[in-house]
């Protein structure tokens, strides 16, 4: 890949890549090297205003176009992504620090899949109609949906293009024009998406992308009076700020927030599958997935054997240059995030936790010697109420907690402020169903982790979010339904 294509990140407004009106930029750092990658346009409210004007000009014709036409444009965009999968995977890896193999097999294919899925979903979405019979009245009640309007879509840095497209695709498919913002930490693939949109003839003004920081570029989107809906994915504390900014003007908000997800391993689990599942759930993408299982709850009768195997498996990980094909773990996303995770490890030790492996800075040879690498850590011995087991760390840190029976496992699993996801490992079907139904989470996987069907609901309970994405839930968020009630005469008076 030609690095010059990612050295200058610009806004994408009205079909063109443009700098900020005031010309200001931010620096983009490559996490695996700690060196500058280039500049990012630093968006402000004046840039957001410009994007909203473009989105407003394009709104009516996009909203009135048939779903087939919108689907056609989304599929062309998906094809544009697939045509450049290798460049996009390299760019995502360079910008985020994740292994290129992960970007190639997960992030970029899923970005294309999001666009294709919602292109189809909009075509097949139906509206409800009810025949109502009241004494003396015959009615047809029809639910008519219309696009909600210009939609703000704000996404985080951990799965950059994957989550950005997960938000914009349903908005566009539902007939809304969009002002989106990726994280300033990983802005590159959204910029490339703007280029692809131009190349594939995406209608100008329908999709607009503002780059820059949360407070300077994100807040003006949330507070803009012409944007009636905000779809946000990110941290719980940012979600609280956004909710408070959006509430006074009664904006519709969808909040996908943080997690502290439990992996529950019962003594009747398939042992090898459970070890592998818990390992993947803990450390995939450097532990930087909202769905990662950072709390591993293990039945006391198998805890020692399980811990030994998990530690062995963790030590086998190849950590280093994310651009090498055999790398299993790349760098954390930024130096500040690395420092945050290290501080959590210090707190874990101070609270009496035993770090069985990992938790050390790594300096790979060569170009990555100044990158933000940390070896994956497995901790045991901490109380389930300790900070390590309560607060989201969002890094390669897994804590083992033991339990003695099903009831205790459920109580520990639910004993946090979050409720995003869980995975349950057992060969006992009755137990699998019983436990899954009692866990407070938006998603419960049984004998698997992070398997997704885009038609299913996705979201969090408690402090993990508000609302649901996935399938028609995503589309409905970007639509306003109106009940049209039609009275008619059932007996001919002619
Ligand atoms: P974050 O700091 O909350 O940022 C998320 C997005 O919001 C970024 O684009 C950020 O911009 C922007 N932002 C920050 N402050 C804002 C404000 N005042 N107004 C408007 N926008 C603002 O989250 P992150 O650190 O990028 O991502 C990690 C978090 O996301 C974790 O908690 C993780 O669990 C969560 N997450 C949740 C899900 C889910 O589906 N539930 C999925 C992935 C990640 P800048 O980065 O440019 O400042």
Image: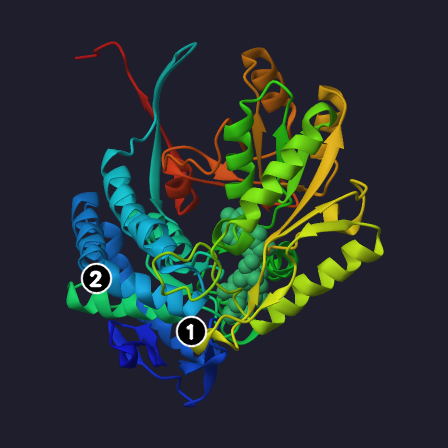
Q: Is residue 253 visible?
A: no
Q: Earlier in the sequence, mark 2 or mark 1?
A: 2
Q: In this picture, is 115 found above or below 455?
A: below
Is 457 displayed left or right of 378 in the figure? left
**Residue 138 vs residue 480, the one in the foreground:** 480
Secondary element under disc 1, as helix, strand or loop, is loop
Which residue is disc 1 drawn over?
211
Query: Residue at 51% across / 35% down in the picture?
Result: 277
Q: In this picture, is 3 found above or below 266?
A: below
How crowded pointer 1 is (Cα within 10 Å; few <14, some 14-19, many 20+) is rated as many
Query: Residue at 32% across / 50% down in the picture?
Result: 105
Q: In the image, is the residue at mark 1 within 8 Å of ligand 1 by its beta carbon?
A: no
Which residue sits furthest bottom? 23
User: How far across and down, in percent of the image, does residue 411 sit?
Assistant: 75, 29
Is 372 displayed left or right of 121 in the figure? right
Query: Residue at 47% across / 71% down in the picture?
Result: 32
Q: In this picture, is 75 found above or below 137?
A: below
Is 260 displayed left or right of 33 in the figure? right
Residue 238 tag number: none
**Residue 302 vs residue 372, the one in the foreground:** 302
User: How far across and down, in percent of the image, does residue 238 sit?
Assistant: 62, 60
Secondary element under disc 2, as helix, strand or loop, is loop
Which residue is disc 2 drawn over?
84
Look at the image and tell me in which quarter the N terminus lies: bottom left
Q: Is residue 421 visible?
A: yes
**Residue 342 vs residue 459, the one in the foreground:** 342
Dividing the picture into quadrants, the one containing residue 375 is bottom right
Q: Quadrant of ligand 1?
A: bottom right
């Amino acid at each position: 890949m030609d690095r010059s294509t990612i050295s200058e990140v610009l806004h994408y407004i009205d079909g063109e890549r443009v700098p900020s009106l005031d010309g200001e930029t931010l620096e983009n750092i490559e996490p695996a090297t700690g060196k500058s990658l280039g500049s990012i346009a630093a968006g402000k409210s004046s840039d957001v205003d410009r994007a909203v004007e473009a989105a407003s000009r394009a709104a009516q014709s996009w909203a009135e176009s048939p779903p087939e036409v919108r689907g056609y444009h989304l599929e062309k965009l998906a094809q544009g992504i697939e045509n450049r999968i290798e460049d996009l995977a390299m760019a995502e890896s360079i910008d985020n620090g994740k292994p290129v193999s992960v970007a190639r097999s997960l992030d970029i294919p899923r970005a294309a899949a999001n666009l294709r899925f919602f292109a189809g979903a909009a075509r097949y979405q139906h509206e409800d109609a009810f025949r109502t019979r009241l004494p003396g009245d015959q009615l047809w009640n029809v639910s008519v949906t219309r696009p909600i309007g210009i939609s703000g879509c704000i996404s985080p840095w951990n799965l950059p293009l994957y989550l950005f497209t997960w938000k914009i695709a349903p908005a566009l498919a539902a007939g809304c024009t969009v002002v989106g913002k990726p994280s300033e930490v990983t802005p590159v693939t959204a910029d490339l998406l703007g280029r692809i949109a131009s190349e594939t003839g995406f209608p100008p003004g329908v999709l607009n992308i503002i780059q820059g920081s949360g407070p300077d570029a994100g807040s003006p989107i949330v507070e803009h009076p012409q944007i009636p809906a905000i779809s946000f994915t990110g941290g719980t504390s940012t979600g609280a700020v956004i909710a408070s900014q959006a509430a006074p003007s009664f904006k519709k908000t969808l909040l996908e927030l943080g997690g502290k997800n439990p992996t529950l391993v019962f003594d009747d689990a398939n042992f090898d599958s459970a070890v592998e599942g818990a390992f993947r759930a803990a450390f995939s993408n450097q532990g930087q997935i909202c769905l990662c299982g950072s709390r591993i709850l293990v039945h006391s009768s198998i805890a020692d054997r399980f811990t030994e195997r998990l530690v062995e498996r963790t030590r086998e990980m190849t950590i280093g240059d994310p651009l090498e094909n055999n790398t299993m773990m790349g760098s954390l996303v930024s130096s500040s995030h690395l420092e945050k995770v290290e501080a959590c490890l210090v707190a874990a030790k101070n609270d009496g936790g035993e770090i069985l492996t990992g938790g050390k800075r790594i300096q790979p040879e060569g170009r990555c010697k100044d990158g933000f690498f940390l070896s994956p850590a497995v901790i045991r011995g901490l109380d389930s109420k300790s900070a390590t087991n309560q607060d989201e760390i969002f890094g390669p840190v897994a804590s083992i907690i033991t339990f003695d029976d099903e009831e205790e496992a459920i109580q520990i699993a639910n004993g946090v402020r979050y409720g995003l996801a869980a995975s349950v490992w057992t060969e006992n079907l009755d137990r699998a169903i019983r436990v899954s139904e009692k866990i407070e989470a938006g998603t419960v996987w049984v004998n698997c982790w992070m398997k997704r069907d885009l038609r299913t609901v996705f979201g969090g309970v408690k402090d993990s979010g508000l609302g649901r994405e996935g399938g028609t839930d995503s589309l409905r968020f970007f639509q306003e339904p109106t009940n049209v009630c039609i009275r008619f005469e059932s007996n001919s008076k002619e």
